Amino acid sequence: MAPPPPFHVEQTEASSLVDLKAVQTYGEIRGSSTLRQNLARLYSSKSSSPLSPDNILIQPGAIASNFLAFYALLRPGDHVICQHPTYQQLYDVPLSLGVERDLWKCKPENNWLPDFEELKGLVNDRTRMIVLNNPQNPTGQVLPKLLMQKIVDFAESKNIIILSDEVYRPLFHGTSPMDPEFPPSILSMGYKNTLATGSLSKAYSLAGIRVGWAASRNPELVEQLASARDYTTIAVSQLDQQVAAFALGPETVHSLLGRNIQLARTNLELLDKFILKHDEFCSWTKPVAGTTAFVKFERDGKPIDAKVFCETLQQKTGVMFLPGDYGFGSEFKGYVRIGYVNRTETLRDGLEELRKFMRKEYDDVPVVD
């Protein structure tokens, strides 16, 4: 597979990225107009109804956007249903706010897709919010359009808010926009009580630019978040927002995403070959989006102790994985999360170290029941 096309931000003069002469005030409190216009254009491009820039709030990362949504919209005694496994913040912050929580579990035997009938059984008369992560961390799977429509129609019938963490969107490398089941943003599903959060950190590979956002088609939800935001965020760095506006601008964003998608495909092919060569010990559902994979390691039909495996691997080779039962819940014995969309040479070197570890050290890793 061809290497990713070059993308060199350093070829752009600094003066075209940031206005170094501007007075560094707080700036626009809800976020840069240019940045919000660029985001609105991206959300509107796949929708029959344009999204107004006024319906977008800029935050210092998606993590701040998610927290703001929980803080602004939930109260003690409310009930939340969260897709799982997922980013820990999404299911633990509601608990810290006195909210009851149920996990809508995705199972490997169903390619990590949740069961819609189970969702209906989890809802009660206090259910305030359904939390989705699409594409999903750590599996790299997506909720297909038909399932999303069922979720949206059901939530609308119950007047339940949907919060969708879309931080890995639009890094789709194993599914095509031409596929009828290709997942749209939650904001394109025709239900106003939805919130989408995102950032530059994952799909755009700009984690050092601390910019994220929350967006909704319901102005009332936006105003609730904006009111609560006054207690957590005065404004986001003007310098960061100017770089973000450049990255998401029409002359940059498609090249940036194209580079990242090609990098993901190139690296995923390397990881896929490794797993096929070690299929006696490794299994997975191959990711179709995002930057992470959830791989199960076994020996003699039993899951390995993932925490011991990851610690020993890191100590002896410098390669670091996240143990699934440590990071996502005790039911994920033997699973590890692998971040694979880094420099191709780094991944290739890491897989070579893992190969040598599997040959020499793997038999010493304990298994668990």
Image (cartoon, rainbow, N blue to C red):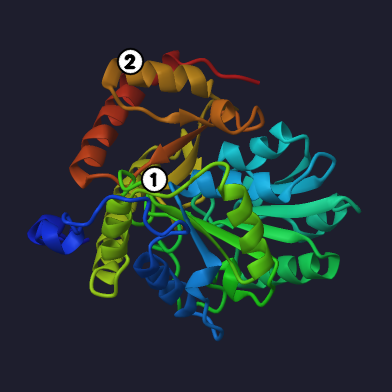
| Label 1 SS | helix
Q: In this view, does 178 lie above or below 366?
A: below
Foreground mark, 1 or 2, reads 2
- Residue 134, quarter of the rendered image: bottom right
Q: Pointer 1: what residue?
A: 276
Q: Which amino acid does label 2 sit on?
A: Gln
Q: In which quarter of the image is the C terminus?
A: top right
Which numbered circle lies on residue 315?
2
Q: Is residue 301 above or below residue 111?
A: above
Of residues 56 and 297, the one nearer the viewer is 56
Left or right for 147, reference 174: right
Residue at 21% x, 35% y is: 349
Q: Which amino acid does label 1 sit on?
A: Leu
Rounded to the nearest whole Å, what is the CA distance between mark 1 and mark 2?
25 Å
- Residue 367, quarter of the rendered image: top right
Q: Evaluate whether residue 205 shows in this view.
A: no
Q: Where is residue 336 in the image (x, y as percent from the top left)?
A: 48, 33
